[in-house]
Image: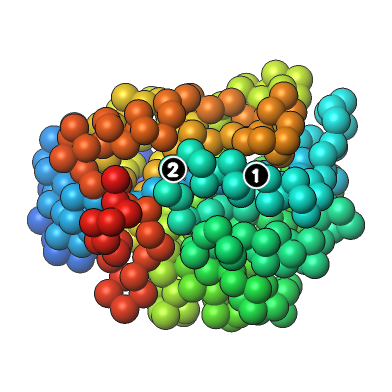
Amino acid sequence: MFIDEIRKIGWDATTERIMSKTDADVVRALNKSHCDVDDLMAMISPAGAKYLEPMAALSRKYTRERFGNTVNMFIPVYITNACTNSCVYCGFHVENKMKRIVLTEDEIKREYQAIKALGPFDNLLILTGENPVLANVDYIARALDLAKPYFNNLQIEVMPLKMEDYALLRQHGLNGVICFQETYNEARYKVYHPRGMKSNYEWRLNGYDRMGQAGVQRIGMGALIGLEDWRTEIAMLGYHLRYLEKTYWQTHYSVNFPRMRPSENGGFQPNVVMSDRELAQVTFAMRIFDHDVDISYSTRETSDMRNHMATLGVTTMSAESHTDPGGYACYPNALEQFHVADSRTTPEVVADLKRMGVQPVWKSWDRSFDIPTMNPCVAV
């Protein structure tokens, strides 16, 4: 389990290693064809910030070689905001006075139909709050069953589950799981997750191993940027990614660097702010570190940022997202989990990508080649 590995690494020691990196360390990393985590530390260090142009060029090169001029499109759907956790930064906080919605089967189908009316989305991400009573495995399985007539690639972002539960959901059409560790800093983890299921750092972290043991095809991972030092978070993410790729080598991986946005739970503000330039630095560094990993940007990021990075390293994007349950058709005024920054319509996102020479791809990933399926009938 990765929990055993990360406890050998040490948070403070990793921070010190990153901050000690020099120009020579960065140049050495940029001249290697295969980088290790130490090289990743150099590229995300303060010294690495001076090398954005060569990093961007390398990131663009590796992205084109591996993914072509394509961006895979997906859309999220929240089916409930019922949650038993007390995450201090989240709009779904259990003590937040808000209407809790659990979509019925008919409402879930209406959401799917509304999404299909927005564009030819084929990659769906189903999200819930963490509520083992109202949003249990049976409820998630039924949501997957209902999605199969509309979408071919189904992923979930829900509470960490048992290995047997992931295996069961695979029988209902599950292709992938996304889970954010939020912070890899175990000593500070409970500051942000004081109560509820999510307060168990070890259970959450070991969830990725359970996904791999269950044979989940795609695993998405990341840290919430804004809680702890972002450089150390990304280094830990690099360690975690390498461990998973070695241990569960038949699984494919994606990473995301969600920057904290305002929520409606009392005004929690980020402890650490990552600038656009620093987000670009992290994106380039991750692509150079791992040529094959899928890098995803959600609508948390602005349209300008997403447009710019679509040619330089990002390979998956969402469009026209609603972060409230039933937001596409049933309950458009429900409370969001977080505010989106990119409010463009799907056609507007597509038009912008095409103007930059990037082809939006709607179909699910081609498993035989692990590159986006280039079907001219659906890529619009």
Disc 1 secondary structure class: helix
Where 147 sits versus 188, above or below? below
Which quadrant is home to the N terminus? bottom right
Residue drawn at (29%, 51%) of the image: 379
Residue 334 percent location from the top left of the image: 74, 28
> Foreground: 149 or 290?
149
Colour scheme of the rendered structure: rainbow
For disc 1, the marked residue is 111
In the displayed structure, does residue 252 sit left or right of residue 99? left
Which quadrant is home to the C terminus? top left
Which residue of the protein is positioned furthest toward the top in this rendering?
267
Q: Tell me if I can see residue 276 in this picture.
A: no
Q: Which mark is residue 119?
A: 2
Q: Which mark is residue 64?
A: none
Residue 330 percent location from the top left of the image: 72, 35
Q: Residues within 10 Å of mark 2 (few under 14, many from 20)?
A: some
Please identify the quarter of the rendering in which residue 365 is found.
Answer: bottom left
Q: Tell me if I can see residue 346 in this picture.
A: yes
C-beta proximity under 8 Å, tags 2 and 1:
no
Sequence-wise, the earlier of marks 2 and 1 is 1
> Foreground: 297 or 7?
297
Where 220 sits versus 89, above or below? below
Please identify the quarter of the rendering in which residue 261 is found.
Answer: top right
What amino acid is found at the position of numbered circle 2 in the picture? Gly
Residue 342 percent location from the top left of the image: 44, 26
What amino acid is found at the position of numbered circle 1 in the picture? Glu
Q: Residues within 10 Å of mark 1 (few under 14, many from 20)?
A: many
Residue drawn at (85%, 30%) of the image: 99
Residue drawn at (74%, 64%) of the image: 142
